[in-house]
Image (cartoon, rainbow, N blue to C red):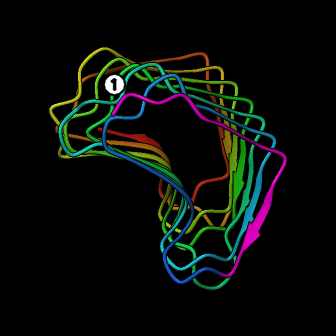
Amino acid sequence: NNTSNYIYRNTVFEFSQHGIGLTDENSQNHIFGNTVISNGLYGILADEHDLASSVNYFYNNHSLGGPNQQHGLSFYNTRFQVVSNNVLNNNTSYGIYIWGTSHNGQYISNFVSNNTTAGFYLNNTSSTNSRISSNICTGPGQTRGIHLQGSDAVITHNLLKQHGSEGAYF
């Protein structure tokens, strides 16, 4: 079931799970200009259990966490996602959470602030060829700017400022 979707200019708030979710066999999706606020788990989730997703674009979205939303953007088993010019702040864990087997992600020019644990977190993934570049990660409420654990990524030209513990942690 290969589909292309355009999800744009929506305001999505206070759902028990996810504000916007993409699952299984979606390709060529464009998620842009959305505002997601205070959803139960993820503001925007791309969850591809069988690695079917390819070339998805996430840009100009705003995720304002609120008291319950754990992550602004979350990617599980995805490949070829382009994530740029998003504003991700005040989530209870991570601004951008990348896990599972996520490959070839481009995370460019995002503003990530005041997420409790980290701005970017690549967690125990077998991720390869990911690039985190030209992002601004800031906020005294955020423990780490960028946290890589068991993953492979190129980290370049980011501004990491005012973190409680480390700007970058590997």
Q: Viewed as shown, does residue 107 lie left or right of 168?
A: right
The residue segment tinted magenta is 1-14
- Residue 155: percent from left, percent from top: 45, 21
**What residue sits 47% from the left and 25% below the top?**
81
Report the front residue among 165 and 21.
21
Report the front residue among 121 and 43.
43
Q: Quadrant of residue 12?
A: bottom right
Specify whether residue 90 is painted magenta. no
**What residue sits 17% from the left and 46% below the top?**
124
Tag 1 secondary structure: loop
Residue 164 in the image: above or below residue 51: below
Q: Quadrant of residue 169?
A: top left
For badge 1, the amino acid type reads Arg
- Residue 21: percent from left, percent from top: 50, 55
**What residue sits 52% from the left and 22% below the top?**
28
Q: Viewed as shown, does residue 104 lie left or right of 13?
A: left
- The quadrant of the image that shows the N terminus is top left
Q: Quadrant of residue 61?
A: top right
- Residue 121: percent from left, percent from top: 39, 47
- The quadrant of the image that shows the C terminus is top left
Q: Single out the residue that lies furthest toward the front.
A: 1
Specify whether residue 5 is painted magenta. yes
